[in-house]
Amino acid sequence: MKERDELLIEAIRTLDFLDETINVFSLHIEDLESAIEGSDEIVEDLKLSLEKLKKSRIKLLDFLDSETERITPNLKSLAGPLIAARLIFAAGGIKNLAKMPSSTIQVLGAKKSLFKHLKKGTPPPKHGIISQHPLINTAPKDKRGKLARIFAGKLAIAVRIDYYSDGGRRVDLMKDLNLRISSVRGVDS
């Protein structure tokens, strides 16, 4: 199991680095383009390199999609490939993630907010990485905490099924998640 998630962890590290590189590179190309007149060849070469980086990013996302499907199909079906891989990365591996309580999964990736809460007494974080999921980030602010709690609970179950069982997909997880979410939205709406 260890080798399987090491690939995922390294792919997420590479993706983060690639995203940062693409952003910085884009800005520098724009600056160079406005500063240099008559050197279109240099700028065009740099733009081609940037396009290659963007294509590599797409290939890396495809790799993450297939790897999360192979390694954690239930976690991927609930969270999506990118959030599933980021959770595994933040936990330090699938084994660690499978051992975590849902309350920890809920705030995984919210280190800054947690330390700010401990130091300055700000409200504690309600969600971390999972806040990137459309279920959480499109919900009204007053429901995000409750939805994050429900979502993290299902993610905890999904990753445990993936880690401790044969890895078959369980469709009832998504069905149950949707049922719980609709009850939250229906009660307070």
Image (tube, rainbow, N blue to C red):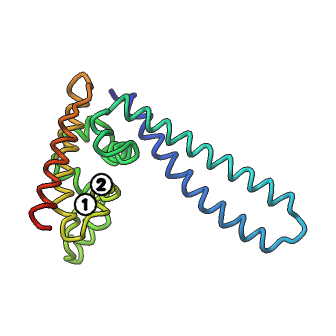
Q: Can you tell which mark lies on residue 127?
A: 1
154 to the left or right of 51: left
What quarter of the picture does the C terminus occupy?
A: bottom left
In this rendering, the answer to whether 95 lies above or below 167 is below
Q: Position of residue 87 (x, y in %)?
A: 32, 46
Residue 134 lies in what quarter of the image? bottom left
- Tell me: residue 129, above or below residue 85: below
- Name, please, the residue furthest toward the top: 166
Q: Give coordinates of residue 79: x percent, y percent.
A: 31, 46
Q: CA distance from mark 2 to mark 1?
A: 6 Å
Task: Please tell me which residue is depicted at 28% across the width and 67% down the height of the picture.
Answer: 113
Q: Residue pushed farthest right?
A: 38
Which amino acid does the dot numbered 1 rest on?
Answer: His
Q: Secondary structure at mark 2?
A: helix
Residue at the limit of the structure toward the left, as seen here: 187
Residue 82, relative to residue 120: is it above or below? Answer: above
Q: Is residue 80 left or right of residue 100?
A: right
Residue type at tag 2? Ile
Q: Nearer the viewer, residue 139 or 158?
A: 139
Q: Residue placed at 19% from the left, 41% from the top?
A: 175
Asked whether 87 or 167 is in front, the reply is 167
Dot 2 alpha-carbon crowd within 10 angstroms: few under 14, some 14 to 19, many 20 or more: many
Instruction: Say left or right for 52 vs 150.
Output: right
2 and 1 marks in contact (CB < 8 Å): yes
For residue 130, the mark is 2
